[in-house]
Amino acid sequence: MDELDLKILQMLENDGSLSFTEIARRLRLNESTVRKRVLALKEKGVIKKFTIVVDHEKIGFSTLAVVGIDATPDKLLEIAQKLAELPETKYVATSTGDHMIMTEIWARDGRELSRILSEKIGAIEGVKKICPAIILEKIK
Amino acid sequence: MDELDLKILQMLENDGSLSFTEIARRLRLNESTVRKRVLALKEKGVIKKFTIVVDHEKIGFSTLAVVGIDATPDKLLEIAQKLAELPETKYVATSTGDHMIMTEIWARDGRELSRILSEKIGAIEGVKKICPAIILEKIK
Amino acid sequence: MDELDLKILQMLENDGSLSFTEIARRLRLNESTVRKRVLALKEKGVIKKFTIVVDHEKIGFSTLAVVGIDATPDKLLEIAQKLAELPETKYVATSTGDHMIMTEIWARDGRELSRILSEKIGAIEGVKKICPAIILEKIK
Amino acid sequence: MDELDLKILQMLENDGSLSFTEIARRLRLNESTVRKRVLALKEKGVIKKFTIVVDHEKIGFSTLAVVGIDATPDKLLEIAQKLAELPETKYVATSTGDHMIMTEIWARDGRELSRILSEKIGAIEGVKKICPAIILEKIK
Amino acid sequence: MDELDLKILQMLENDGSLSFTEIARRLRLNESTVRKRVLALKEKGVIKKFTIVVDHEKIGFSTLAVVGIDATPDKLLEIAQKLAELPETKYVATSTGDHMIMTEIWARDGRELSRILSEKIGAIEGVKKICPAIILEKIK
Amino acid sequence: MDELDLKILQMLENDGSLSFTEIARRLRLNESTVRKRVLALKEKGVIKKFTIVVDHEKIGFSTLAVVGIDATPDKLLEIAQKLAELPETKYVATSTGDHMIMTEIWARDGRELSRILSEKIGAIEGVKKICPAIILEKIK
Amino acid sequence: MDELDLKILQMLENDGSLSFTEIARRLRLNESTVRKRVLALKEKGVIKKFTIVVDHEKIGFSTLAVVGIDATPDKLLEIAQKLAELPETKYVATSTGDHMIMTEIWARDGRELSRILSEKIGAIEGVKKICPAIILEKIK
Amino acid sequence: MDELDLKILQMLENDGSLSFTEIARRLRLNESTVRKRVLALKEKGVIKKFTIVVDHEKIGFSTLAVVGIDATPDKLLEIAQKLAELPETKYVATSTGDHMIMTEIWARDGRELSRILSEKIGAIEGVKKICPAIILEKIK
């Protein structure tokens, strides 16, 4: 990992659709150098994934929640794994703080969120308490 | 927004580096249809950004924190804006729950995190309390 | 829903006993227009109910509580439904925040509230914790 | 206050548009008795108000919040009073529990709620912390 | 209950060992009036008990705790009753706030308090969580 | 302090109006021994006060609250002192737990409690937050 | 315990490897006096242990956590005992405050900490909730 | 750092007064090897300090507290530094969790602790809230 790698990563974070040619032009390198480095970053797992950021409201999800979950302690990792498998979760992590599992959920409205929390997440064995916080506005 | 758009979005979320040709092949469409739709999704702002997901540990950031911030109520939006401008924040949102602002911060270790919290975030006028929770493991 | 509808709704919120004639007079419309609009608002469910606001102390209820309820997650909606059936609850909602169910209860005094919480609400299967906050004074 | 008064109150809570004739018919009284009693209940302040319950979503308010407010203790009642004057608050009370003031706010979406909280409520002198909980679904 | 009764009560709260003669002298009444009133106050239950306030440290209890108790909701009153029967509790009440039962406990030191909490209070069926706060200094 | 002293103390806690003669009779001592010991216990400050327990509801105080108070840390003891001087406080202590000062307040109703909290306690310089919990029922 | 004992204790807290000769020299005593006193302090249990303070990061433990543990109340002391037997705990105490057991844990990274919390601590019968706080920087 | 170093560290943690000869004997090494390694461990800072563990009760400190401190965010590190300079603090760290600074304090009784918290810690500029938890019993 050198300075050049970091610059390439930053460029791709800002625009993951940049072509090798374009990155090469901006960094005054030749394309094959860029290509090799990006492939190496992918192989080493530094770049875990190319992806897109979708506007949740424009595809009909107006209610986003960051949900803290209290789990039976000895099932912590198993529950985190099951949450990761639900299509409704966008993000799952174990953390310190008020709750040991945090997840982000997208729902069409409050009614749908209630149902996901109760019928999908609440139905996982070992989930004891669910504490949703609604995202009012994403600034970054 | 129809079924086809949603399928294309899902494909690109899973792999943002897919070529139009590849998407077309998988959905049994011709390339120009895919191209037009993706461009339309970008123009309408449904796709906000192409980006990459970086493995934080592999680039030297071993301490990730979700930080809840208590702000002087009448400076809420101003403070959220200033947080978004800091390079150390990966994410900024206003939310309900224990704190009205939530942000994600990447630091090299606990010592660096202490300094970012105190000297960068604590220095923003109107920030009253900072409650960091450390991410132990990202599962999704 | 136009401006006129909103004006009629606001008038009826302030005084639900206004006659069509009176509303018509104030808005300089003829009575049949008002009648048609109010009936339409009821039919479309915009007006859910005509009701009265009762002074709780004057009918002997001196202890009002907003009660947060922690429920077994997979019984959330079932418990909310059972709470709604109790005559002692004036209001039941699922919510984010410290507790996923919130309800308002009217009791004659603290002793009666204790008994309602323990014997009526605590007896519902799946209710795990009850957190009452007493309303000291209703200002609006 | 006797049994009959309580029955009339309950009838009007369920349907505030019932005519005196209809109430009289159901309770097997003559109309003038009902009329006198209802007027007395209004005069004594037992009935504080005739009103309607509006479906918030059908008039465009999709984000409802119960907001706990921490206030400078010696301005508690003054702040509660100012909150009651805002058109955005549907309900204001002082209470025990986590926060000494509770209010209910209706907004069109999360963005509007953020703005009301910061620019309207946060701007009241003496308001120190604002803790919104979103109502997911009203059951009763 | 008149002004005179209230004055007598206040005098006895300050010094419960005052003789009827002394109270009579201070209030410029004759002794039999005082005697009759005090007896009446006891009979009506206004005076629940004559008692003494003991200095806990001087009799060897150096660790006092106000203990909040979370109970299985439907056993709330039963548990409060059992707590009242323990000699270690000086006070038991149901309350709103963070915990629905509050009790005060006197122990010789932290080790003894741990044991009372775990073996006496924790052993009551339905007690789920025990939250002790230590009294550092009694001012009044 | 011996066994006999403890027995006398316990008797007086249960009934502070017992005469020396009666205590002597029950413990099979002569009256002068009891008299000497009680006086010694008072002199050494073991007995801090003879007092009465009054039924709060029977003298018109229907709203009792245990109030946690957050104070500017360097004014902690000064504020506790000022609270002890208010006639409305029945009890004041510094403690660990959620709040560093705890006090018990008796009020006629919720409205009066609001006013005491805001105008009496909130007016003490350095008081930052007031968290009242209502006592629903005193069991012991 | 006199002044001299306290001085010796303080010296040894600062540097536990000081020889008796060196302590004697600094305090202008003869060596045999120091030797006798230190042995006496050990025998009486005033000095519980000579030990070293290790730099956790230099031996590969980059994630330190203070962990609050909620336990089934009647198993409190048993659980504390089992925690003390785990090699991963550096410290175990019962305490007041948010959690009745507190322990300090050293782990190589967040992933290892997650596993210790879930598989070692969570597996102890009666452990109901685990609340880790990460130590960012030890200052003293 | 190899296996041998770790074994020596563990021995010295258990008994910091072990002579090089004794360590050598137990590990079947010669003394000069042990001496060199211990000196190297000290030089590299792996061993930060030789010290003793004192029984707090036997030297008159019966009240130990773990104290969480809320600080003005931009003075966090400065305040932690000042706390470290107080002789009453045994331990100071910045942390995540409910409070950003944690410290351990030894006092002779609750009254002394109140005074240390208010007059020593509360007097540091920028300290906003102090939350002490009392250690009931140290198990490890």
Image (cartoon, coloured by chain):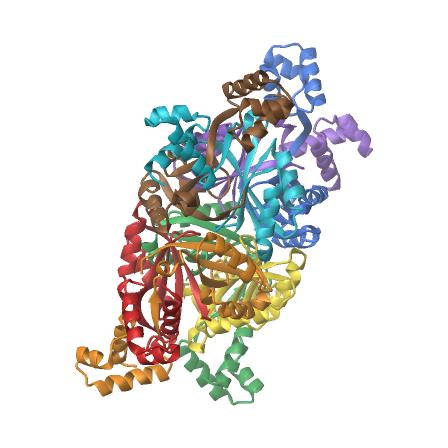
Chain colours: A blue, B purple, C yellow, D green, E orange, F red, G cyan, H brown
Q: Is residue A16 above or below residue A114?
A: above
* Left or right of residue H129: residue A45: right
Q: Nearer the viewer, residue C127 or F34?
A: F34
Is residue B22 depicted above or below F27 in this figure? Answer: above
- Residue H95: x and y in percent read 49, 37
Q: Nearer the viewer, residue D50 or G127?
A: G127
Give me the residue at 61% from left, 70% from top: C85
Q: Quadrant of residue C57?
A: bottom left
Q: Is residue B91 above or below residue H47?
A: below
Q: Is residue E121 above or below residue H104?
A: below
Of A3 and D50, the residue lying toward us: A3
- In this view, the residue farthest toward the front is G32
**Most foreground residue, C133 or C35:** C133
F81 on left or right of D115: left
Tally of marks: 0
Q: What quarter of the picture does the C terminus of chain B occupy?
A: top right
Q: Quadrant of residue A80?
A: top right
Please indicate, yes or no, whether residue B62 appears anywhere in the rendered image.
no
Which percent across, then down, holds residue H38? Answer: 54, 21
Image coordinates for residue E50, horizontal then vertical, percent: 34, 75
Q: Position of residue G71 (x, y in %)?
A: 59, 52
The quadrant of the image that shows the N terminus of chain B is: top right
* Residue at image point 62% right, 22% down: A9
Residue H131 visible: yes
